[in-house]
Amino acid sequence: ETGVTQTPRHLVMGMTNKKSLKCEQHLGHNAMYWYKQSAKKPLELMFVYNFKEQTENNSVPSRFSPECPNSSHLFLHLHTLQPEDSALYLCASSQEATGWDLHFGDGTRLSIL
Amino acid sequence: KQEVTQIPAALSVPEGENLVLNCSFTDSAIYNLQWFRQDPGKGLTSLLLIQSSQREQTSGRLNASLDKSSGRSTLYIAASQPGDSATYLCAVRSYNTDKLIFGTGTRLQVFP
C-alpha cells in the first residue's frame, strides 16, 4: 500500500457511542494531521503531530481525543459526539510539520444520529 | 485574521471551454498559495503551489497566477474535459500563523 489510508470510510454512530477513526501513512513522513471538512465550510485544522508529539490543538472539544503511537499511525477517538460533528474527517501527512507538502487520505464520512 | 474566498461556488460548463476559477485572500503577508483538487468522496490532491515571490505556475492544462498585492489568485483550466469535474480548493499559508487557510472551494462540472 502507498499513500495515506483511512478507515473506516463511513461511520454512523449515536451520540453516546464510542468509536475511533484510524489513519496510516506509508510515505515515511514525520508529521500527521486531522482536518474536519463540513458542508459549505473551509477545511478546519484540528490536530498536528510531529514525531509522535502533539504540536497543535486548534481548540478542539475534548470529545475528540487524538492518539499518535508512532509516526505512521494516527487515531481519532470519538465519544459523546453532537450532531454538528457530522462531517468528513481527513487525515494528512507531510515530511515536516510545516505542512508544505501535504498528502491527504480519502477521509471518513461521519454521521451522528 | 486571514480569510480565503472562492468565487463562484459552483460552475457548470461544456467540454472544451477554457475557464477561470477565482480565489481571494484578505492578508497579503503569505508564504505561498496552493490549489488543490478534491474528487467526490476523496481527499485533496495538490495541483500547484505558488511561492509568494512567484507570479504563476503551470502544470499541463493548468495555470495558476498570483497577485499578492491585490490578494488574488486565479486557476486557469484550458480545454476543459469531463475528467476535470471536481471541487477545486485554494489555500494560503500566512506569515502570522504559519497555517494553511482554505477557501470553501469551487465545484466544477464539465459536461460532454
Image (cartoon, rainbow, N blue to C red):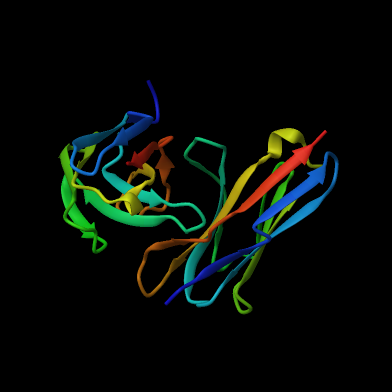
Q: Is residue A56 left or right of residue A108?
A: left
Residue B31 screen position, x and y as percent: 47, 67
Observer-nearest of A89 and A73: A89
Residue A32 to residue A55: above or below: above
Q: Residue at x 37, y 63 (%)?
A: B99
Q: Residue at x 79, y 37 (%)?
A: B111
Residue B67 screen position, x and y as percent: 65, 71
| Residue A18, image quadrant | top left
Residue B63 screen position, x and y as percent: 70, 52
| Residue B93, image quadrant | bottom left
Residue B21 screen position, x and y as percent: 70, 57
- Residue B37 seen in the current view: yes
Q: Is residue B58 left or right of residue A55?
A: right
Observer-nearest of B110 and A55: B110
**Which quarter of the rendered picture does the N terminus of chain B lie within?**
bottom left
Q: Residue at x 22, y 35 (%)?
A: A20
- Residue B66 seen in the current view: no
Observer-nearest of A101 and A12: A12
